């Protein structure tokens, strides 16, 4: 009987090690060149023109994890409304994944949801109505990105860049190296604006 209990305990321990579930987190670190991103921080663009940002929000969706030697796991129903003024950490779920080699994602909202009714989502959902608005209207859908600020001499010229449209929904792949520590895998991305 003692031998049978020992064997059962060993089997349970071995099973838990073989099928360990790890929580996957996506962390987006906001940068402006070498510096941490901040609103109302005067910087120079690639043409040496002054600018500062007053608003920067964008959607991340269509996430796929590339892990454990090239296996791909597509994550359904992940939408993130990233606000560069806030620390961005999103739990992507719990999976039997040990090492992540890359993450694939889109900036924007996939066509099936892009032209839907934002009022159908709970107010805490990223696709629900926001203020300032991220929804352009039924025909155009969501703003994939909203970048607004000041530019030019003495930062006297206002600019707005609102990217939208199904044709602008493209996949991006970023190579990463992330492994499980204490049943957590943190994917750290650095977004340089």
Image: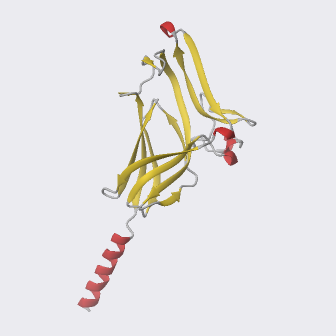
Q: How is the image coloured?
A: secondary structure
Q: Residue furthest right?
A: 139
Residue 7 quadrant: bottom left
Horizontally, residue 128 falls left or right of residue 11, namely: right
Residue 133 appears in the figure: no
**140 to 2, vertically: above or below:** above
Q: Residue furthest left?
A: 2
> At 50% across and 10% down in the image, what residue appears?
155
Image location of residue 18, percent across then percent down: 36, 71
> At 42% across and 62% down in the image, what residue appears?
69
> At 45% across and 22% down in the image, what residue appears?
39
Most foreground residue, 79 or 179: 179
> At 58% across and 29% down in the image, what residue appears?
146
**75 to 134, vertically: above or below:** below
Q: Residue furthest bottom?
A: 1
Image location of residue 137, percent across then percent down: 72, 33
Horizontally, residue 147 falls left or right of residue 118, namely: left
Residue 168 appears in the figure: yes
Image location of residue 180, percent across then percent down: 34, 57
Give the quarter of the figure containing the N terminus.
bottom left
């Amino acid at each position: 009987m003692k031998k049978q209990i020992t064997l059962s305990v060993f089997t349970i321990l071995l099973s838990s090690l073989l099928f360990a579930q790890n929580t996957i987190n996506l962390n987006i670190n906001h940068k402006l060149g070498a510096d941490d991103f901040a609103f109302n921080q005067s910087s120079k663009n690639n043409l040496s023109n002054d600018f500062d940002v007053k608003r920067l929000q964008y959607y991340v969706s269509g996430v796929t994890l590339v892990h454990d030697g090239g296996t791909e796991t597509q994550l359904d129903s992940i939408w993130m409304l990233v606000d560069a003024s806030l620390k961005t950490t999103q739990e992507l779920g719990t999976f039997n994944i040990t090492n992540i080699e890359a993450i694939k994602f889109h900036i924007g909202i996939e066509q099936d949801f892009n032209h839907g009714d934002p009022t159908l989502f709970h107010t805490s959902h990223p696709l629900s109505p926001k203020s300032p608005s991220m929804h352009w209207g039924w025909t155009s859908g969501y703003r994939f990105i909203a970048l607004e600020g000041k530019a030019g001499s003495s930062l006297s010229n206002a600019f707005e860049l609102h990217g939208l449209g199904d044709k602008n929904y493209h996949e991006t792949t970023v190579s990463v190296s992330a492994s499980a520590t204490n049943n957590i895998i943190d994917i750290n991305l650095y977004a340089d604006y």
